[in-house]
Structure formats: structure tokens, C-alpha cells
Image: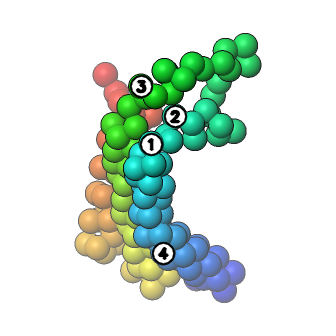
Amino acid sequence: MTKSLKFGLNTIIVLGYLGIAIGYFLFLTPLIFIIHAVHNNTAQTILNSQTFLSLPSQHQVTATAINSFPNWPYAMIMSIGIIITVWSLIIGLKALTKILDHISDQNYLSQANLGELKVESTKIALSPYHERPE
């Protein structure tokens, strides 16, 4: 294995471990939605957010619509969605780093690689964007 290939693999492995560490900190993100639900200002936060899609002509919202917004269901659904997404990101990065570790050790056809590839293929097969043959 060439030095540049070994260096590239090790760089990707380090970035993978860094991504895993950042992923564990992303588990704190649902707390933001729960805090907004506790303070009962979820609708106001969504309305004032720059990332929320709203039409310029329909930017007027009544106070009763804001007060009747379901704060807790929205916060729980967003929290569950974030937790599932972050967990799958961590699993995928762990599998990738293990496969790359084996490749950098020049252990190409090992049983451990087969197990990690099964994890990756399961994740891809469950993806809603994956085209399934008919």
C-alpha cells in the first residue's frame, strides 16, 4: 500500500472518529425543542425562524393559531426524529471506520468486514431513497 493511500485512509478514519464524537454531542439537540415546549413558545420560534418555509404573502398568523399550536407533540416528534437520525449516523460512521481500519491493516477479506458491510447494506436497503428492483 502506498504512503499516500495509507495517509488518505488514516485521514478518513480520523475524520470518522471525529464525526462519531460530534454525533454523540448531537444527542443534546432535542433538548432545544423540549425547552421551547416547556416555555410554550414553539410556534413563535418556528414563525421567526429563517429556516422555516413560509410564503411571503401568508406571513400573518393569528394569535389563536399560535396559542393552539401543539407544542409537545411537535417537540416529541422532532426529538425522536433527531435521535433516530443521529443514531443511524453514528452506526454508519462506526461501520465505515472499522472497514477502513481493516483495509489500512491490509486485511481485505475478513469476517469483520463482512459483518460491517451487512450493517451498511441493511442501512442502505432501509433507506427510502434506495431504488428496489421489482
Q: Position of residue 94 (x, y in %)?
A: 40, 70
What kind of residue is marked 4? Ala
User: Are there few (<14), some (14-19), or many (20+) residues within 10 Å of tag 3?
Assistant: few
What kind of residue is marked 1? Asn
Q: Which residue is mark 3?
A: 68
Q: Which residue is mark 4?
A: 21
* Alpha carbon distance from label 1 to label 3: 10 Å
* Alpha carbon distance from label 1 to label 4: 32 Å
**What is the secondary structure assignment of the residue under circle 2?**
helix
Q: Is residue 22 visible?
A: yes
| Residue at (45% x, 48% y) in the render | 39
Q: Which mark is residue 43?
A: 2
Q: Position of residue 86 (x, y in %)?
A: 42, 57
Q: Quadrant of the N terminus?
A: bottom right
Q: Are marks 1 and 3 in contact (CB under 8 Å)?
A: no
User: Are there few (<14), some (14-19), or many (20+) residues within 10 Å of tag 4?
Assistant: few
Q: Give the side of residue 57 with respect to residue 99, left or right.
A: right
**What is the secondary structure assignment of the residue under circle 1?**
loop
Question: Which mark lies nearer to you, 3 or 4?
Answer: 3
Q: Is residue 109 shown above or below 40?
A: below
Q: Which residue is mark 1?
A: 40
**What is the secondary structure assignment of the residue under circle 3?**
loop
User: Furthest residue to the right?
Assistant: 56
